[in-house]
Amino acid sequence: TSLSRLLTFPLLQAPPLSHDPRMPFKRYVEIGRVALVNYGEDYGKLVVIVDVIDQNRALIDSPDMERSQMNFKRLSLTDLKIDIKRVPKKKELLEAMEKADVKKKWESSSWGRKLIVQKRRASLTDFDRFKLMLAKIKRAGLVRQELAKLKKANAS
């Protein structure tokens, strides 16, 4: 009886799967994977993995930087991937990036838009922040007025 109780105990049952258990990850470290540098002097730059050195490092390249090795901990993998061969020449990499339209796809992604907004906010001057505060106050007042009109219309 104690065994049957254990078998029917809800904590021992597997939770319902909301994804395919055989494919837990969507982004893999692979040649052609576009990544975002998340630490160091190249912070915020988009790079492409052109070769995997070992289990901790990759050879990366980008149009605006020299080819170098970087630890995977400093890279955030994106959903973008370009079709390139292993260790392509710089010219081939640039052509592949233009063909895949990496920059435009990145800027249209939600992650890319979020980073653009963060950079824009960080570059605001004190006066710009003041104008933004006034605009938010004005917008909130308009929303409040419209809401009051709707409540009044529904009440009568």
Image (spheres, rainbow, N blue to C red):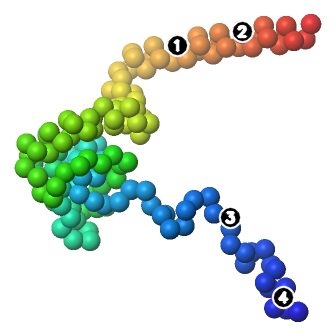
User: Disc 4 residue type?
Assistant: Ser
Disc on the earlier residue, 3 or 4: 4
Disc sitting over residue 16 in the figure: 3
Please name the residue that numbered disc 4 is placed on.
Answer: 4
Residue drawn at (85%, 85%), measured in percent from left and top? Answer: 5
How far across and how far down the image is residue 68, in percent? 13, 56
User: Disc 3 residue type?
Assistant: Pro
Nearer to me, 115 or 47: 47
Please name the residue that numbered disc 1 is placed on.
Answer: 135
Left or right of 58, for residue 122: right
Nearer to me, 156 or 109: 109
Disc on the earlier residue, 3 or 2: 3
Q: For residue 109, what is the image quadrant?
A: top left
User: Disc 2 residue type?
Assistant: Gln
Q: For residue 120, what is the image quadrant?
A: top left
The N terminus lies in quadrant: bottom right
Nearer to me, 6 or 32: 32
How far across and how far down the image is residue 152, in percent? 85, 8
Q: Nearer the viewer, mark 3 or mark 1?
A: 3
Q: Nearer the viewer, mark 4 or mark 1?
A: 4
Please name the residue that numbered disc 2 is placed on.
Answer: 145
Residue drawn at (30%, 48%), measured in percent from left and top? Answer: 81
Mark 2, residues whose alpha carbon is within 10 Å: few (<14), some, or many (≥20)?
A: few
Mark 4, residues whose alpha carbon is within 10 Å: few (<14), some, or many (≥20)?
A: few
The local secondary structure at tag 1 comes to helix
Mark 3, residues whose alpha carbon is within 10 Å: few (<14), some, or many (≥20)?
A: few
User: Disc 1 residue type?
Assistant: Ala
Q: For residue 148, what is the image quadrant?
A: top right
